[in-house]
Amino acid sequence: MSGIVGIVNADQSPVDREQLAQMTGYMTFRGPDVQRIWAEGSVGFGHTLLRTTDESANETQPLTVDQRVWIVADARVDGRRELIRSLQDRGESVNLDTPDPNLILHAYQIWGIDCLDRLTGDFAFAIWDSREQRLFCARDHFGVKPFFYAHLGKEFVFSNTLNCVRLYPSVSEKLNDLAIADFLLSGYNQEIDTSAFADIQRLPAAHRLIWTPENFKVERYWTLPTDGYIRYKRDEEYVEQFLDLMRLAVGDRLRTNKVAVYMSGGLDSTSAVAIAKELLSQTYPSYDLRAYTTVFDRLLPDEERYYSGLVAEHLDIPIHYQVADDLELCKGWEDIEGCAPEPTLIPLVKSNKEYYQAMTSHSRVTLSGEGGDGVFHSEGSYYYGVSMIRKGKIGTLILEIWKYWQSHKHIPQPGIRARLKEALGISSWTPSYPAWLNPSLEKQLNLKARWKNVYHQGKLKPIVSFRPEAYAMLVEPFGSYLFESYDSSVTGFPTEVRYPYFDLRLIEFLFSIPVISWILFKEILRVSMVGKLPEPVRCRPKAPAMGNSIKLRLQQLEDQWVDEFDETPRLSNYVNKAVIPRLCGMTAQNGEALIDLRPISLNYWLHQLSSIKIDSKSTQEARYVLGK
C-alpha cells in the first residue's frame, strides 16, 4: 500500500518543493522502499513505494512515458492479461512484466477518462495531463484504497493518507461536526464524501474527480449492477464458474510467493486460503503461505482455534495464534499508543507489536475473508421471491423452490416474520439514545432523526434487485470504514490487505445466480469446497457472536482510568461529560458499553490531534531523488 500525494495550483504559482518533500517523507511508513517527488511549475506529485507484487520490482513513480502526462498511484489491477492484450492491440508497448501504474497510464493514453471502463481492482490514482491542463483522479469500485483531498480556492491537494493532507499549510484543523456526531452515534462517518476535518473531503468509492483551473467536479463512474440474470442447465456449471472466478479473484491478489492470511475458523477466509494454496503450488516452485488467527481461550467461548487448526492441518500450512486473553490490559492513558486519523474506539489492551511485526516481516501481502458475509448476505427468500414475481418469473421461482425442497427436504426460509419486524421498527434489541450528547449540537444537526436512520427503524429495504439486503451492505459507508481500519495509516504497519470477495467479476456473478439454490447459507461456497476443506469446517453453520470482548475487558480493569479522564476543551462541543455513565466494572448491554465508550474515545482522539510526526531523514531522501 504505497503512499501518494499531489499539489496543484490554479494560479500557476510554483509548487513548494520542500513542502511536497515533507509531505512525501511523512508517508515513508507506508512506502519504505523508495520516496520520490516530481514537480514542474504549478504541479507536483510525491510517492512512497511499497513493493508487493512480482511486477513492482520494475516500478518507479511518479511516472511518465512522454513527459506530458504523469501518474501517481496506489494500485493493484485485476484482469491484467485481458487489459494488456487490449493495450497491445492498440499499439502500446506493454507486457506481463509491466507494473500496474504503467498499465493505468497506458490505458489513459488510449481511452482518456473512459479508461475506468477498462479497469478493475483496488486503486487510487491521479493523472496530470499537461496537454489538457487537467487533473484526473479516481478511486476503485468498492473503495478499498482511500483517497482524500482539499479544494482550497486556487490550491488543490490530495493523498491516500488523511494526515498527509493535514500537513498542507492552508488546510485548517477545523473539525467536521457532523462526522464527529456520526462517530458518537454509529461508530463511523455516515457520509461517503467527507472526513472528520472540515477542509478535507473523501473521494467516494466508484467516483472520479476532474480538476482544471476553471472547473471542478466529482462524479460516479460505476454503479453495482442490479439486473444480472444467469441460469445454467446443470448445477455443475454454477460450481465450475464460481470456482473459476474465485481462482481469478484470489490469484489477482497473490502475485507474490510470500503471503499472510487473516484466517478464522469460518468458511469465508478458509475457502480463500484453500484456493490460495492451490494457486501458489501451481505458480511458484517454492512459496510461504501462513495463517494468522486471533483466538480466545478463556475470556469468551470461542471455537476458532479448533476449526482454524483443522484447516491448517488439512492444507499443511503453518498457523500463528494470537491469544487475546493474554494481551496485557492497559493500566492508564499512557499505555495507549498512536492515534488514528479519525475517531475510533480506544484499545483497552496493549498492542501486540511482536505479532504484527512477525506478520509484516513475513509478507507485505495479507489476504482477508472480509466481504464474504456481505456478498452472500441473505435474509431469507422474501426479497428474492417478490423480485422474481415482479419480473414475471413465477414459474422459475416455483422450480427453484421445488429443487431446494428436493435437496434439503424443507422449503427455503422465507424471512416474512423478519420483514414484518423490520417494517414495524421492532428489533430484538435497540440501544438507548445517548443522553450525553450536547443538546445544542443535537438540535443543530437533528441527531435524533439521524439516530433513527442509523438503526433503520421502521424501514423495509427497497427492492432494487434480487438481493437488496446484500446490495445495501456493499454500498453503505461502512465499507470504506472497514477498509480504512486495515490501512497502514491506522495500523502503522507496511502491509497491503487484499479482499478476494470484493472482486467485481465474482460479485456480479453472485448477484445474477438463483438465490434460493445457491446463495442461502452460502450453498455455492460450501459445494465448491468439497475436498478442499475439512468437512467440519465446510459444513460449519454461521457462528453467532459469543460475547463482547470490550465489555468483558471493561469489567476486568483493576482501576477506573477509563472513567477518570481529563476533559479536553473541545469535548464539550459534542458531549456532556457529567452524563457519561461509568463503564469499569459495569454490566451494561454489549452495545451500550460500545456506545458509551465512544465519547471517551473521542476525548482521547481530540487530545492526540497534534501528534503528527515528520521523519526529517525521509523528507531529505524524497527531496534528493530528483535532485531539483
Image (cartoon, rainbow, N blue to C red):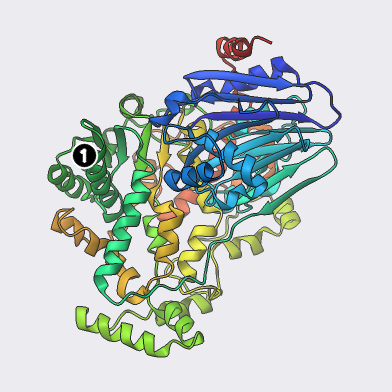
For the C terminus, give its image quadrant.
top right
Residue 510 visible in this rendered orientation of the protein: yes
Q: Residue at x 31, y 56 (%)?
A: 244
Compared to residue 234, the image places residue 198 above or below, namely above
**Left-right relation of 235 to 76:** left
**Label 1 neighbour load within 10 Å: few <14, some 14-19, many 20+:** few
Task: Place residue 215 in its image quadrant.
Answer: top right
Compared to residue 159, the image places residue 585 above or below, namely below
Compared to residue 248, the image places residue 2 above or below, namely above
Can you give x and y, in whole percent of width and height, for residue 1 in the image? Answer: 48, 32
Q: 107 or 135: which is nearer to us?
A: 107
Residue 582 visible in this rendered orientation of the protein: no
Q: Residue at x 69, y 45 (%)?
A: 209
Say how many tags the image has. 1
Task: Place residue 212 in its image quadrant.
Answer: top right
Q: 474 or 337: which is nearer to us?
A: 474
Can you give x and y, in whole percent of width and height, for residue 45 in the image? Answer: 66, 26
Amino acid on which disc 1 is placed: Ser
Q: Residue at x 37, y 81 (%)?
A: 414
Q: 96 or 431: which is nearer to us?
A: 96
Q: Residue at x 41, y 39 (%)?
A: 497
Q: Secondary structure at mark 1?
A: helix
For disc 1, the marked residue is 281
Task: Place residue 453 in its image quadrant.
Answer: bottom right
Q: 380 or 447: which is nearer to us?
A: 380
**Left-right relation of 483 to 517:** right
